[in-house]
Image (cartoon, rainbow, N blue to C red):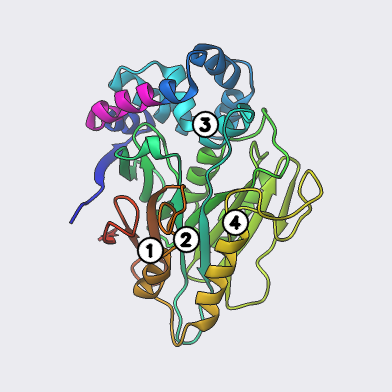
Amino acid sequence: MTVTRTLLLEGEPAARGEAHGEQARDLIVEAAQRWRHDVGEHWADHLAALVDHGGFQATARARTPWLVEELEGVARASGVDVRTVWALNLLDEDWWTRAANIRAEACSGFGVQPGPAQDAVIGQNMDLPSWLDGLQVLLDVRPSRGPRVLAPSYAGMVATNALNEHGIGVCVNTLDQLPTDAHGLPVAFVIRLMADQRSFADAVAVVNSVPHASGQNYIVGSPDGVADLECGAGGVRDVTGTSPWLAHTNHPIGAAAVDGTSGGHVTNSEQRLDAIRQHLENSVGPIGVADAAAFLREPPLCRGTGGDRGFTFYSVVMTLAGQPALHLTAGPPSRHDYVTHRFG
């Protein structure tokens, strides 16, 4: 069984970042090299446009200064230039900054509301560029102040999604049809800020209060409920609905897109949304980890299968009630088993 490398990050923000940099130095160096190769020969110009000329750093310093300290610690301990570590953390923002060259990959997420015989569950397939394969890590964040957090990610990045010890979880998928803002808070920082909250209401309040840099859908889960929030620069729309479950892929389902359309811009988004909905509608009895894993490992939800040229970086299911747990694969769920990580 392949298990994602777990990095133990304890104490104050700078110490946590340095622990990240020390434990994953080889992978962070590799990630930096791969990023430069992916951008191409003009990577230095793009780095300047992404990191130096936008307002991402200033907003992150104002809204999440502790997380900026953590990022800077990653750079110090890994020996990778801090500007490049910033680039690794601006995943979604990188996509739309160089939109002429690449498109956002995808992601398929779901949530199940708590009920009489059903505990709250959220999960997703995290679809990312295939050049990130092999860089998977799980951050076990144990801060001096605030809740413990389990955050799947890749080496050098502060989170791609997260679950904390209070059962507050967040899954995300890109909505590149929605407005962007070079002075907004980047997605990775929004995720970790949400994971720093102790209640469902506070986590939802984060999404509603921060200035968003990128078009993004946030599935927010807790033992008490699940919400689905479509976000872009200047606006947040709640698309949770009244169903006992929810599903989302890569087109807005509750808001008009920038170009006036609402579907299918990212590869097979509508097909994947239909597949999740059908699985959830046809489920008999409570939906648990095994049920979610069964549909997340199959095409079209698991990218790179069935002729799909995409790539599923990992799959995750978060069980939120009682003793919260994160069930994570070390790569595509079609080839990797789910491994359970708990807070006990």
In primary-sequence order, the first of circles 1 and 4 is 4
What residue did someone put label 1 on? 297
Q: Confirm whether the magenta stretch covers residue 25.
A: yes
Residue 301, which numbered label? 2
- The structure residue drawn at horizontal position 52% and vertical position 17%, both measured from the top left corner, is 47
Mark 2–mark 4 distance (CA, rounded to whole Å): 9 Å
In primary-sequence order, the first of circles 2 and 3 is 3
In primary-sequence order, the first of circles 4 and 3 is 3
Mark 2–mark 3 distance (CA, rounded to whole Å): 25 Å
Q: Confirm whether the magenta stretch covers residue 47.
A: no
Mark 2 crowdedness (10 Å alpha carbons): few <14, some 14-19, many ≥20: many
> Which one is in front in this view, the residue at disc 2 or the one at disc 3?
2
Tell me whether circle 2 and circle 1 mark residues in contact (CB < 8 Å): yes
Horizontal and vertical percent position of residue 74 = 35, 26
In this picture, which residue range is highlighted in magenta? Answer: 21-34
* Residue furthest to the left: 1
Whether residue 84 is situated above or below residue 231 in the rendered picture = above
Disc 3 residue type (three-letter):
Leu
Could you tell me which secondary element the residue under label 2 belongs to?
Answer: loop
Along the horizontal axis of the image, is 254 left or right of 332? right
Mark 4 crowdedness (10 Å alpha carbons): few <14, some 14-19, many ≥20: many
Mark 4–mark 3 distance (CA, rounded to whole Å): 23 Å
Tell me whether circle 1 and circle 3 mark residues in contact (CB < 8 Å): no
Whether residue 265 is situated above or below residue 66 in the rendered picture = below
Disc 2 residue type (three-letter):
Leu
